[in-house]
Image (cartoon, helix red, strand yellow):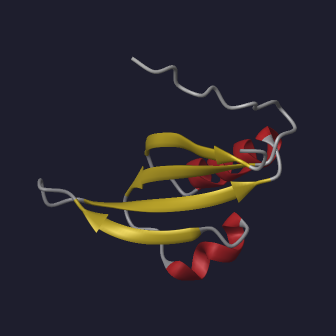
C-alpha cells in the first residue's frame, strides 16, 4: 500500500472545500458565499441537496460560510476538504 499524501494545512492556509447542505440554495445566494460554485442534486429518497465548492482564504472564512448556511436553516450534510493552495 502506498502512503497517502497528507496536505499541509494550517489555520491560515487557503483551501478548497465541498460543502453539502440539505435543501435548495438558489444561485442568487452565490455572492453570499464568495462566488462559490453551486449545484442542486436530488437524492434517491426524493429530497434535494445543494453542493457548494468553496475556495477559502483560511479556516475563519470557512467558518463564516458554515455560519451563513446555519443562518439559512439548511442542515449540514457533509464538508469535504478537496485541496490546499500549496498542493
Tell me where residue 24 appears, x and y as whole percent. 39, 67
Residue drawn at x 81%, y 30% as measured from the top left: 10
Name the foreground residue: 56 vs 83.
Answer: 83
When the figure is inspected, residue 74 is found, relative to residue 12, above or below; the finding is: below
Q: Is residue 40 rendered to the left or right of residue 82?
A: left
- Residue 65 picture location, percent across and down: 68, 52
Depth check: give the residue in front, 9 or 35: 9
**Outermost residue, bottom side:** 28
Residue drawn at point x = 56 percent, y = 71 percent: 37
Q: Residue at x 51, y 50 (%)?
A: 19
Q: Is residue 10 above or below residue 81?
A: above
7 relative position to 86: left or right: left
Q: Residue furthest front?
A: 2
Q: Position of residue 31 (x, y in %)?
A: 70, 75
Give residue 32's position: percent from left, percent from top: 70, 69
Q: Is residue 6 left or right of residue 20?
A: right
As drawn, which residue projects farthest toward the left?
Answer: 45
Q: Quadrant of residue 2?
A: top left
Please state, as top left, top right, bottom left or bottom right, where the C terminus lies in the image: top right
Amino acid at each position: 500500500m502506498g502512503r497517502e499524501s497528507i496536505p499541509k494545512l494550517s489555520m491560515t492556509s487557503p483551501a478548497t472545500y465541498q460543502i453539502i447542505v440539505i435543501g435548495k440554495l438558489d444561485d442568487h445566494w452565490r455572492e453570499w458565499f464568495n462566488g462559490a460554485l453551486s449545484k442542486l442534486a436530488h437524492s434517491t429518497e426524493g429530497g434535494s441537496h445543494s453542493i457548494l465548492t468553496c475556495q477559502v482564504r483560511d479556516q475563519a472564512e470557512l467558518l463564516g460560510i458554515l455560519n451563513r448556511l446555519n443562518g439559512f436553516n439548511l442542515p449540514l450534510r457533509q464538508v469535504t476538504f478537496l485541496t490546499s493552495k500549496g498542493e
